Image (tube, rainbow, N blue to C red):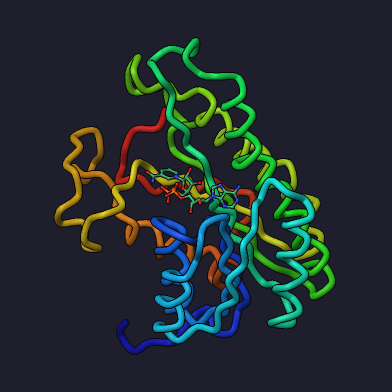
Amino acid sequence: MAERAKRLQDQVIIVTGAARHLGQAYSVRLAEEGAKLAICDVLDCAETSALCEAAGAEVLSLNVDVTSEDATLDMARRTNERFGRVDGLLNNAGLMTNITGPSIMDVDPDWWDKVFAVNVKGTFLCTRAVLPYMRDQGGGKIVNIGSTTMLRPSNSVNSSMPHYVASKGAIMAFTRSIVRELGQYNINVNTLAPGGTDQDVDLTGSDATPEESRAFGRRGVPSDLTGTVAYLFSSDADFVTGQLIAVNGGKEVS
Ligand SMILES: NC(=O)c1ccc[n+]([C@@H]2O[C@H](COP(=O)([O-])OP(=O)(O)OC[C@H]3O[C@@H](n4cnc5c(N)ncnc54)[C@H](O)[C@@H]3O)[C@@H](O)[C@H]2O)c1
């Protein structure tokens, strides 16, 4: 990347769901900005680890199921043991499970629970796990991942995904519910809400899928989001907390 100050130099940041796609893109960008990373997933993080190390980062790879309290406590403890502090947490791990048909009647109640376990309980557990470290060291920053699906009526009768959308709405509400409590410890907590983002496209967006409902006429690509994540972990965002930041290329959200 171009010569300029690395704005996250030596910040220690945990990224969940880091093995692929957006979690991988966030991790690489944070590495490029100088952060030390604990990359966590139920999948193997070897590829993300190699990319982050190539960007100059110190990396700790951890197998973590965010639905397990023990695993999330271990994640925070091992990160602190390795790097001596925990400055940031990116709650990116998520489940967007398929449904068999277009109706709310097609959403298996067990899948409702699975999606809420990863997206909502996982965000809660990871936040609880890092809080003592951030509090004791005098501050930190947490970014939760929502989705702009939670801000507008569903696109069509074929895309309601009520379990996923409701889980993302819960993440926004969770973020707002803890902002005052965490604020007293100098801990920022915000929600980043991506719009629909293509994964396997080039990073310039030039071959992203066209989409007329967006002001910029296309779906997002990972690099559309990574700069906002880097900003939210930086000192530029020291007075930003409790906010919802939608990054979706100008799609109407309400
Ligand atoms: N891609 C999009 O268009 C889009 C839009 C809005 C929001 N989001 C959100 O962004 C995040 C990443 O999306 P993505 O498209 O890269 O999804 P993805 O499914 O490719 O990646 C999610 C990652 O989370 C991991 N994960 C799942 N369950 C886990 C668990 N129990 N413990 C730890 N890790 C677990 C998966 O293994 C995977 O690596 C998700 O929270 C998603 O809801 C994505």
In the image, is residue 223 above or below residue 68? below
Q: Quadrant of the N terminus?
A: bottom left
In the image, is residue 29 above or below residue 97? below
Direction from residue 186 to residue 231 in the image, left or right: left
Give the camera-side residue of 162 and 249. Answer: 162
Residue 136, horizontal then vertical, whole percent: 84, 72
Give the camera-side residue of 169 and 252. Answer: 169
Direction from residue 103 to residue 142 in the image, left or right: right
Q: Residue at x 32, y 37 (%)?
A: 251
Residue 85 quadrant? bottom right
Residue 250 quadrant? top left
Q: Residue at x 63, y 62 (%)?
A: 89
Give the camera-side residue of 241 and 38. Answer: 38
Q: Quadrant of the C terminus?
A: top left
Residue 209 quadrant? top left
Residue 159, horizontal then vertical, whole percent: 37, 23
Direction from residue 205 to residue 81 in the image, left or right: right
In the image, is residue 180 above or below residue 166? below
Count up the numbered dots.
Answer: 0
Give the camera-side residue of 213 and 1. Answer: 1
Residue 37, horizontal then vertical, whole percent: 57, 74
Q: Residue at x 22, y 56 (%)?
A: 201
Q: Residue at x 18, y 34 (%)?
A: 212
Direction from residue 59 to residue 248 in the image, left or right: left
